[in-house]
């Protein structure tokens, strides 16, 4: 059997609760479930719906921020890897250019020695 007691609050009690929680509670309800009492406050279906909607939108906003942060991190990693690849290509082409210059000067030196030898 379920026993329920509704306790009407005085104006001073209502003011204290409103100051502490920001909610306007006209009464407190105490019900007995089995051997332990349960205290609850009356809520209107509209307030419960608003609270549920607010919680859902909060979760959605957090998920959206997380997704944006993930995309930003991926873009940053991609940009860093692109810069690394470009600098590696630049270094390779620099080495290739140096070795090509060295090879040309080596050939030129050989042909100069050969020309001197033939004279």
Image (tube, rainbow, N blue to C red):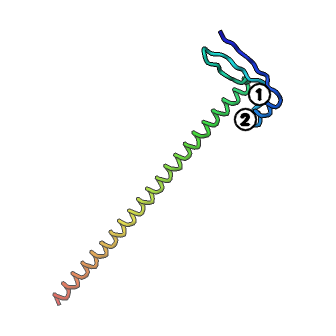
* 107 shown above or below 39: below
Between 107 and 28, the one lying in front of the other is 28
Q: Quadrant of residue 84?
A: bottom left
Between 22 and 113, the one lying in front of the other is 22
Between 109 and 57, the one lying in front of the other is 57
Q: Tell me: 78 left or right of 108.
A: right
Q: Position of residue 93 (x, y in %)?
A: 36, 67
Q: Quadrant of the N terminus?
A: top right
Instruction: Characterize the local packing of mark 2: few (<14), some (14-19) or many (20 or more) Cα atoms within 10 angstroms.
Output: few
Tell me whether the residue at label 1 lies in contact with that at label 2, contact meaning CB atoms closer than 8 angstroms: yes
For mark 1, give the secondary structure: loop
The residue lying at 20 percent from left, 85 percent from top is 113
* 67 shown above or below 46: below
Q: Position of residue 52 (x, y in %)?
A: 66, 29
Q: Tell me: 3 left or right of 9.
A: left
Residue lying at the far top of the rendered structure: 1
The residue lying at 63 percent from left, 32 percent from top is 56
Q: Quadrant of residue 107?
A: bottom left
Q: Which residue is mark 2?
A: 21
The residue lying at 31 percent from left, 75 percent from top is 101
Between 42 and 115, the one lying in front of the other is 42
Image mark for residue 25: 1
Residue lying at the far bottom of the rendered structure: 119
For mark 2, give the secondary structure: helix
Q: Quadrant of residue 49?
A: top right
Q: Quadrant of the C terminus?
A: bottom left
Residue lying at the far right of the rendered structure: 11
Q: How many marks?
A: 2
């Amino acid at each position: 059997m379920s026993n329920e007691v509704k306790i009407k609050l005085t104006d001073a009690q209502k003011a204290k609760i409103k100051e502490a929680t920001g909610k306007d509670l006209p009464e407190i309800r105490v019900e007995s479930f089995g051997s332990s009492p349960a205290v609850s406050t009356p809520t209107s279906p509209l307030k419960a719906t608003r609270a549920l909607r607010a919680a859902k939108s909060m979760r959605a906003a957090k998920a959206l921020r997380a997704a944006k942060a993930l995309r930003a991190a991926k873009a940053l990693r991609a940009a860093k890897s692109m810069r690394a690849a470009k600098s590696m290509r630049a270094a390779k082409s620099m080495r290739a250019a140096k070795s090509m210059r060295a090879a040309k000067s080596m050939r030129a030196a050989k042909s100069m020695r050969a020309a001197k030898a033939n004279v």
